Image (spheres, grey):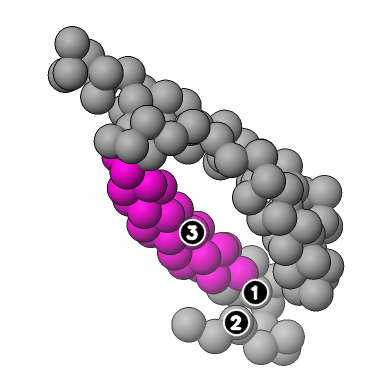
Amino acid sequence: MGLAPSSSTPEERLLSLRSSIDNIDAALVHMLAERFRCTQEVGRLKAEHEMPASDPQREARQIARLRALAADAQLDPEFAEKWFNFVVAEVIHHHHRLANEAAADEG
């Protein structure tokens, strides 16, 4: 849906902007869900092969990459890094849980 033209009333413009924000939020939720489906597979693979839950070198590369992408997109790189760190903390938590479940299944 396109944004309301600037000649519209402030209320119409506000509704249009909010509608766009709602659509973007929905897309973000679906993308995060897909990302977590992928990281769950990574976690299972790591658990099966007794690999560490975190990979600090990859995380550092990802932070640098995301900071650059954010800067290119005119998004605050600090915000992008905070978001990434939040997501990675949750992913690592899931990986530890999967490793513990795999160890319990073997025991």
Magenta residues, start to end: 17-45
Q: Secondary structure at mark 2?
A: loop
Q: CB atoms at circles 2 and 1 under 8 Å apart?
A: yes
Residue located 65% across and 74% down the image = 13
Gap between marks 3 and 1 measured at Cα: 22 Å
Q: Is residue 34 magenta?
A: yes
Please state which amino acid type lies under the numbered disc 2: Leu
Residue 42 x/y as whole percent? 38, 47
Q: CB atoms at circles 3 and 2 under 8 Å apart?
A: no
| Pointer 3 or 1: first along the chain | 1
Q: Is residue 46 visible?
A: yes
User: Label 3 belongs to which residue?
Assistant: 28
| Residue ranking furthest to the front | 49
Which one is in front, 94 or 103? 103
Q: Secondary structure at mark 3?
A: helix
Residue 3, label in figure? 2
Gap between marks 3 and 2 measured at Cα: 19 Å
User: Label 1 belongs to which residue?
Assistant: 13
Looking at the picture, does residue 81 appear above or below residue 46? below
Q: Is residue 40 visible?
A: no
| Pointer 2 or 1: first along the chain | 2
Residue 18 x/y as whole percent? 57, 63
Q: Which tag is nearer the camera, tag 3 or tag 1? A: 3
Please state which amino acid type lies under the numbered disc 1: Arg
Looking at the picture, does residue 47 appear above or below residue 65? above
* Quadrant that contains the C terminus: top left
Gap between marks 2 and 1 measured at Cα: 7 Å
